[in-house]
Image (cartoon, rainbow, N blue to C red):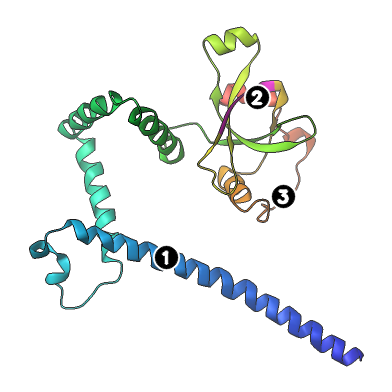
Amino acid sequence: MALLKTMKDRIRNYFIAGLLTVVPLSITTYVIFVLLQHADRVFNFIPQQYHPKEYLPFPVPGLGAIIVFLLILTTGLLVKNYLGGRIVEFGERIVYQIPLVRPLYVAVKQLLVAVFSQSYTGFKRVVLIEYPRKGIYVLGFVTGVASGEVQEITQEVVLNIFLPTTPNPTSGFYLLVPEKDVVPLQMSVEEAFKLVISGGLVAPEYNGRSPQNAKDPCELQQSA
């Protein structure tokens, strides 16, 4: 009986190990395949006589994704010059005149700037706050220190906090939290995003920190 139980445990462990290997690889492969397949739909907007596949001796997997990448890269190059920048500004002025489109455009653009811009200082620090009530903690991202009317009314240092949702961290809540009520964390923004997306399943490694290395919340204002 002991031998049978040992064999069952080994088979179970082997199966779980295989499952943890095959399932992530399969899902990743499937997602990449779907993305490449949908990217090829860009050819539907190209006239048949200019279709790249008409001039290639053999099919190229992911050609649509390559074309989309080159199109975005070319657009970036054009926007970076003076004339391209003026054209974009003119187009944005038109978009800003459309009531329902303007808030959506502004929100998406600001989010992309916050995530991808190397010069943007937001989303560079992860903090812990008590939300939605005392005793319950959530991860938040400091995007800066509040200013103007908000800061004057509160009469204390208030931080701008972006609170992401799970499993889609691109949506969330904007909170104004007193600096004294946030607890800075050592984990990076990337590690925090993984933790949020996985719902706590993918936790970053933590080696502990000494009290002298712990960052006081009051230091946030100086570096935000």
Could you tell me what secondary structure mostly forms the magenta stretch? strand
How crowded pointer 3 is (Cα within 10 Å; few <14, some 14-19, many 20+) is rated as few
- Occupied quadrant, residue 40: bottom left
Element on which disc 2 rests:
helix
Left or right of 2 on screen, residue 145: left
Counting residues from the N terminus, which is met first, the one under dot 3 or under dot 2?
Answer: 3
Which residue of the protein is positioned furthest toward the left in this rendering? 49
Labels in figure, total: 3
Using the image, tell me which numbered label, if any, was put on residue 219: 2
Residue at (87% x, 92% y) in the render: 3
Residue marked by disc 3: 206
- Occupied quadrant, residue 100: top left
Where does the magenta region start and end? 173-179
Label 2 and label 1: CA atoms lie apart by: 42 Å
Whether residue 176 is in magenta: the answer is yes
How crowded pointer 1 is (Cα within 10 Å; few <14, some 14-19, many 20+) is rated as few
Q: Position of residue 53 (x, y in %)?
A: 17, 70
Left or right of 130 on screen, residue 113: left
User: Type of residue at label 1?
Assistant: Ile
Left or right of 91 on screen, residue 215: right
Residue at (19% x, 28% y) in the render: 86
Residue marked by disc 1: 32
Q: Position of residue 75 (x, y in %)?
A: 23, 44
Which residue of the protein is positioned furthest toward the right in this rendering? 1
Residue at (25% x, 24% y) in the render: 93
Which quarter of the image is occupied by the N terminus?
Answer: bottom right
